[in-house]
């Protein structure tokens, strides 16, 4: 029975289009599985011939299963042995299959990507719904961990000096996120940073130009070292204005950013306005009117009005706690006033582009903080690695760089050519026929004949 005949045979028994698609998905999956299994076994026969001629002998026939996106393929191949040499399987070596590898690289790649947008259990369920495969959440977790570890081991290729970027302005931001830990009473801080070359408007949205994201669970020094390494490899900052932004917390001070560009004279630091307003709101919660007024004068960047407002409020406050909080706000604003100045009020070729880091946390927190999730240190690092590689648009490049690539090498191509030559192909012909007319051309058969 041909595949077309089988399709019609199954089609006549289906009740609706959903059932048709379900039946045909299984049919085509079985067809691909059987065909690939046959091809691999035939390929194995031709791969071992040069080795047999070189003195190798067949040790035994071994069965193996590899799960692809379209199904699990079972095939047999030969292990070879030779005196004084380590036995091996030519087909596995030629295909780049590692020992105890049960999933194809592309299957693992897609599973890891799924796991960054949902829980491991949901990812397993999604695979079951969209394919004919059944996979447990434990297996999804193991695949995601192994893929992340491979990506983290991949080192970025260095560029020549002539290839380095020389933007007029480079923005650098950094901040931290607290992640739940499986260790009782502890949390993990994910330190993240990113760079970009400005903002452009696409439709109604403001988009960053050439953003690159970084992150680690080490110290802030580790994060800045990672950023510094990338900048030295990819950028020439000799004539670039570096604009840094952070909340000013421990490890994210202005001098930490300034060191990234070396001995730079063109450096500007901005204290994140969101955190400035948050600090004012938190400290002055006892007086809503004062909160509102102080936020307005700080946004207007008018220090005289700030001093006047704080002096006025201080004159009528009576509680010692309120006076202490007001004094802390005054000291905070005085200490950081030069960093609070808006970009538009500075002598720079740009007027915006900072304060993006806080909103960028959602990409990570949606996966790592929802529903009170807790992580081990290694699990959190692996998930963050996957998220950063996807955010940078380099997931596929980094992961595939770790996969054995001599697949379909010259050895494979030659064996496949030999297999094609010995396979018997049936020549396809187009049947021809005529329509005899035993009546006038004006009849129905006559008109049909004239059409052809």
Image: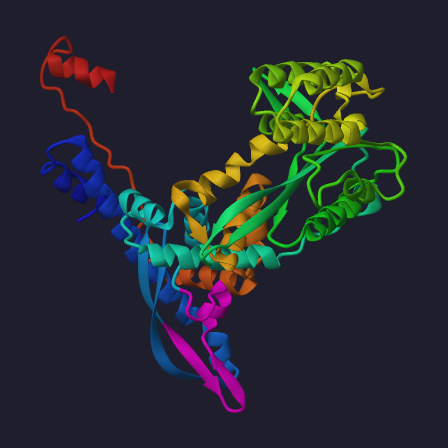
Question: Where does the image place residue 185, in percent across and percent down from the top left?
Answer: 47, 55
Say which residue appears at 62% left-offset and 31% top-offset. 321
Say which residue appears at 70% left-offset and 52% top-offset. 157
Question: Where does the image place residue 16, in percent across and percent down from the top left?
Answer: 14, 31
Residue 438 horizontal side relative to residue 337, left or right: left
Name the residue nearer the viewer: 131 or 332: 332
Question: Where does the image place residue 414, in percent across and percent down from the top left?
Answer: 51, 63
Q: Is residue 200 something one can see in this rendering? A: yes
Q: Is residue 130 magenta?
A: no
Say which residue appears at 33% left-offset and 49% top-offset. 121
Question: Where does the image place residue 229, in percent across and percent down from the top left?
Answer: 75, 50
Instruction: Name the residue at the top extreme.
Output: 442
For residue 54, above or below residue 268: below
Name the residue nearer the viewer: 102 or 424: 102
Colouring of the image: rainbow
Residue 54 horizontal side relative to residue 422, left or right: right
Q: Is residue 270 something one can see in this rendering? A: no
Q: Give the extent of the magenta segment.
A: 77-101
- Asked where in the image residue 335 lies, by quadrant, the reply is top right
Say which residue appears at 25% left-offset and 43% top-offset. 25
Residue 100 horizontal side relative to residue 382, left or right: left
Name the residue nearer the viewer: 51 or 311: 311
For residue 128, above or below residue 243: below
Name the residue nearer the viewer: 257 or 383: 257
- Asked where in the image residue 152 lies, by quadrant, the reply is bottom right
Instruction: Name the residue at the bottom extreme.
Output: 83
Residue 109 horizontal side relative to residue 170, left or right: left
Report the quarter where the C terminus lies.
top left
- Asked where in the image residue 280 lies, by quadrant, the reply is top right
Q: Is residue 94 magenta?
A: yes
């Amino acid at each position: 029975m041909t595949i077309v005949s089988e399709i019609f045979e199954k089609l006549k028994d289906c009740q609706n289009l959903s059932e048709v698609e379900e039946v045909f998905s299984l049919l085509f999956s079985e067809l691909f599985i059987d065909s690939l299994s046959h091809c691999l076994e035939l390929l194995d026969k031709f791969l071992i011939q040069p080795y047999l001629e070189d003195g190798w002998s067949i040790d035994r026939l071994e069965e193996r299963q590899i799960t692809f996106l379209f199904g699990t393929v079972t095939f047999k191949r030969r292990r070879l042995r030779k005196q004084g040499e380590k036995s091996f399987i030519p087909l596995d070596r030629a295909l780049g299959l590692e020992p105890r590898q049960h999933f194809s690289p592309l299957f693992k790649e897609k599973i890891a990507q799924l796991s960054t947008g949902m829980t491991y259990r949901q990812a397993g369920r999604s695979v079951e719904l969209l394919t004919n495969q059944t996979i447990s959440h434990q297996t999804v977790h193991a695949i995601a961990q192994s893929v992340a570890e491979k990506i983290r081991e991949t080192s970025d290729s260095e560029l020549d000096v002539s290839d380095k970027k020389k933007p007029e302005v480079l923005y650098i931001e950094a901040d931290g996120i607290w992640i739940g830990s499986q260790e009782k009473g502890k949390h993990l801080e994910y330190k993240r940073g990113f760079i970009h070359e400005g903002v452009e408007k696409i439709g109604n949205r403001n988009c960053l130009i050439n953003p690159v994201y970084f992150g680690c669970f080490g110290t802030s020094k580790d994060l800045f070292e990672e950023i510094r390494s990338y900048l030295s490899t990819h950028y020439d900052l000799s004539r670039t204005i570096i604009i840094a932004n952070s909340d000013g917390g421990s490890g994210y001070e202005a001098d930490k950013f300034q060191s990234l560009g070396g001995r730079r004279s063109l450096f500007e630091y901005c204290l994140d306005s969101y955190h400035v307003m948050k600090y004012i709101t938190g400290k002055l919660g006892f007086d809503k009117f004062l909160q509102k007024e102080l936020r307005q004068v700080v946004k207007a960047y008018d220090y005289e009005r700030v001093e006047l407002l704080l002096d006025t409020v201080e004159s009528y406050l009576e509680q010692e706690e309120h006076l202490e909080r007001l004094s802390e706000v005054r000291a905070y604003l005085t200490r950081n006033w030069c960093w609070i100045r808006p970009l538009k009020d500075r002598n720079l070729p740009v007027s915006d582009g900072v304060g993006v880091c806080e909103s960028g946390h959602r990409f990570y927190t949606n996966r790592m903080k929802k529903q009170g999730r807790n992580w081990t240190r290694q699990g959190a690092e692996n998930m963050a690695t996957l998220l950063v590689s996807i955010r940078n648009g380099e997931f596929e490049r980094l992961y595939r760089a770790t996969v054995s690539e001599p697949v379909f090498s010259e050895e494979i191509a030659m064996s496949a050519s030999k297999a094609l030559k010995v396979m018997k192909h049936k020549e396809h012909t187009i049947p021809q026929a005529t329509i005899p007319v035993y009546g006038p051309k004006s009849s129905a058969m006559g008109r049909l004949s004239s059409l052809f």
